[in-house]
Amino acid sequence: MPHLSKFLVLSAPSTAASLPTAAHFELPEKVLQFGTGVLLRGLPDYFIEKANRQGIFNGRIVVVKSTDGGDITAFERQDGLYTLVVRGIEDGQTVEENMVCSAISRVLSAKSQWDEILACAANPELTIVISNTTEVGIQLVADDVTQTPPVSFPGKLLAFLYARYQAFNGDKAKGLVIVPTELVVDNGTKLEGILLEQAHRNNLPAEFIDWLETANSVCNSLVDRIVPGRPDVTMQDTLAEQLGYDDELLTMSEVYTLWAIEGDEHVKEVLSFHQVDKGVVIQPDINQFRELKLRLLNGTHTLSCALAILCGYTTVREAMDDQQFASFVQNLMLTDLLPGIPYAIDEQVGQRFGMQVLDRFRNPYIEHRWLSISLNYTTKQQMRNVPTLLHYSRQVGGVPHYVALGFAAYLLFMRGTRQEASGWHGEINGTEYLIQDDKAGYFADLWNRLGPAELTRTVLHNSALWGHDLLTVPGFADEVSNYLEQLIEQGGKATLSKVLNQTVDQQAAVK
């Protein structure tokens, strides 16, 4: 079977994927991208490909391989081409799309091709820098921008910007729009601060530092799309048969897209590809999107996780196939968590986001394991759900029942019964699991000494865990303790059924 290549695409084979045309390979390089990972291929590069096909952006991407790990030979063999396989559910309907993306023009190694990368700085068509170097990438380290290359991502970017400043004699019209996508809050603000500090430490000219600050836009951004990358071998073989070629870079993603970028009209003008997909949002404040993702998607995952495991479910999709559990997730998200978001959210916007999350949870092509979600469980609870609980109590009043049930299940999940070198292990339904949480020992000790009611009050009172004494939330401790005892005595499914029926009865009584 042939491999994906420019020759294969231009020979117009019969394939199940949509293909670029010859004209797309001639577009100028407008983007410098630090990172070769699947998230970049599945989100920013996908948007640029879509825009190119609609004649809107009309530019390609030079990709910088920043780290020593991995290689770029697959990109070379395939002329930078890769197939994006989109699978999932949107508005209750199954979506399947195969697209051969030609947005990447070439991939250069920072280690061996640094001079070629710096030469791109003199390209007048270049207007954008994108990065995804993981959270570790946006850090201030001792760096020398004259090295070939500098050690850190900010050092490499600073050297590139200085080369551009020199190439265009400080022309402020040649500044760039820089959009980091690393999962760091205020990633653009932090990156810009590091660039300025590195510029001072490297004794770069004051005129350049002024150009750096005034001619360039470094934008905060938030990305959200599940891009697992290559599917399993069975699905790879099936797709190869459907497509009629092999693709070493084949990339699978869900349907949902979000790239929220903090920017003004100039940023919108430069990032013209935003016009082709509602998933690209450019506006002065993106905190709404961060709160929605953190509270509704991540918060729901965290509060559903232990209960799902108690009910015997391994993956998110498996749990969502159960109507009762799906009802719990929907009620938790839209009845308890949405009103508790500590940020002004339009209710219709929140409801729409919540329904999209439910579609994503039901995606039959994504296998998201609950035990993986339980990693660093306590920290996630504190960051994602405690602010929501406090805001709900102040603004709505009463106890959010589904939050209380989720929290009770979390307490039971944290009951360590056996310690090994790998850490504390718990047991549910006769199956052992590793508690991957730095507070596992603390909970094991409490479970060894205390009954459910006293344990609940002790944990909720621990301000060091939550940043707040949760015993001060009216009624919450009693509700959690009651649910915890039910979970111990009756199990996950029976308790869930009882809670859902009680809620229906309460709603009927109100009516």
Image (cartoon, grey):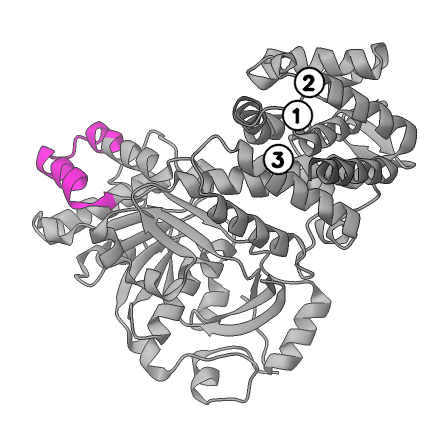
Secondary structure beneath dot 3 equals helix
- For residue 336, the mark is 3
User: Which mark is first along the chain, 3 or 2?
Assistant: 3
Quadrant including the C terminus: top right
Q: Is residue 117 above or below residue 9?
A: above
What secondary structure is the magenta-colored segment mainly?
helix
What residue lies at 48% left-to-right and 84% top-to-bottom? Answer: 8
Secondary structure beneath dot 1 equals loop
Tell me how far mark 1 sits from mark 3, CA to CA. 9 Å
Residues at discs 1 and 2 in contact (Cβ within 8 Å): yes
Mark 2 neighbour density, 10 Å: few (under 14) some (14–19) many (20 or more): some
User: Which mark is first along the chain, 2 or 1?
Assistant: 1
- For residue 475, the mark is 2
Q: Which residues are magenta?
A: 197-217
What residue lies at 20% left-to-right and 45% top-to-bottom? Answer: 216
Q: Report x, y in % for residue 399.
A: 66, 25
Residue 102 visible in rendering: yes
Q: Nearer the viewer, residue 357 or 439?
A: 357
Residue position for label 1: 399
Q: Report x, y in % for residue 475.
A: 69, 18
Q: Is residue 205 magenta?
A: yes
